[in-house]
Image (tube, rainbow, N blue to C red):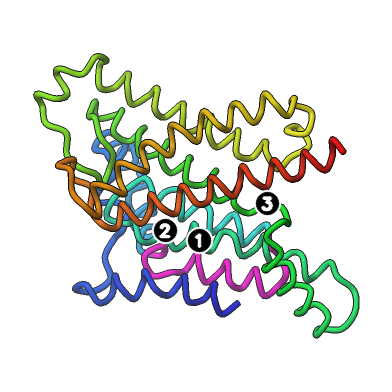
Amino acid sequence: MGAAFALVVAPTAVNLADGGLTWIWTPSLPDPVLHAVAEAGLLDAWLVLDLLAASGVPGGLAVVALAARRPAAAAALFAVVAVVSLAFGPSLWYGLTYATALVLPVMGEAPHSLSGSGARCAVASVAAMVDFARPRRWPAYAVAVLFLGYAAGKAAFALQARLGFPGGPPVSAAETENYFLDAATAQWFATASGVLGACVAIVTVTAVGRRVPRTLMLLVLAGMLLAVGGGAGIMIVDGFVGIGVGWRWYHAVLGMVVIGLFLEMVRSYAVVTKRAAA
């Protein structure tokens, strides 16, 4: 509970310290979307929702849901803020912290299912955390959230016919003109790949995934790992060393997190399906 509270408070504290509480989503909202919201008469409601998210209200409600042993409600609140925030650069830290907090409802389910004293539950929880051979479901959920955030960011730029990603290095007009695809088309393809990636991540921890041939699924995951690892690797090298792309150190940290989560998702799937086959 304390970890969830700290993760919720941290980005809000940074926001407050940086000149006072400000909107976290609206400044990067694509103009067509912003105009559509305004024409629908929902702009005031959107601005209020944005400020509520900036002040940590959804996160506070998620912490309350955790305390009330409602992990599904907590996960939904964390996921909504994480996905929208990851799609828009200025709120990147909200996205990272809320995506991290998303794993807490999943990890918190195990102790409630155990019988016996609180001490036995605590011992079992610690044992599960240090058992590295044990498969884990939460990395798949976290990867799915990251993929959806990627898809949302790409969709935002597709609406503006721009290459790149919100909060990432700017892409010049010359680079956009010389790209082999139209900018909007390329971004919609990237959006679709993000949604597909999220679906595959969820499949690895569901009954549907158990019915897919293990070899085929591992090949799909290996191909995704090459693609994700390649992109994240560029972010890491450019963020920490600098190769001229324009990624910053915090993008590099995000790249390391993404690779680690993806590897753990693949490992957990391999362990579970190997046991089932045996």
Task: Give the numbered dot on residue 100.
Answer: 1
Is residue 15 rendered magenta in the image? Answer: no
* Relative horizontal placement of residue 275, taking residue 63 as reference (left or right): right
- Pointers 2 and 1 in contact (CB under 8 A)? yes
Residue at position x 60%, y 77% in the image: 1
Q: Reading the chain from its start, which is encountered first: label 3 or label 2?
A: 2
Residue identified by numbered label 2: 96
Task: Give the numbered dot on residue 7.
Answer: none
Q: Reading the chain from its start, which is encountered first: label 3 or label 1?
A: 1
Residue at position x 36%, y 32% in the image: 155
Residue at position x 59%, y 51% in the image: 139
Local crowd size for mark 3, using a 10 Å CA cut-off: few (<14), some (14–19), many (≥20):
some
Of the two numbered discs 3 and 2 in the rendering, the one whose residue sits closer to the viewer: 3
Q: Tell me where the magenta segment starts and ends, as one range.
A: 52-71
Local crowd size for mark 1, using a 10 Å CA cut-off: few (<14), some (14–19), many (≥20):
many
> What is the distance, in whole Å, between disc 3 and disc 2 at their CAs?
19 Å
* Relative horizontal placement of residue 97, taking residue 247 as reference (left or right): right
The amino acid pointed to by label 1 is: Thr
Residue identified by numbered label 3: 137
Residue 243 at x, y percent in the picture = 17, 43
* Relative horizontal placement of residue 29, taking residue 99 as reference (left or right): left
Residue 157 at x, y percent in the picture = 28, 33
Residue placed farthest to the right in the image?
116
Residue 251 at x, y percent in the picture = 30, 52
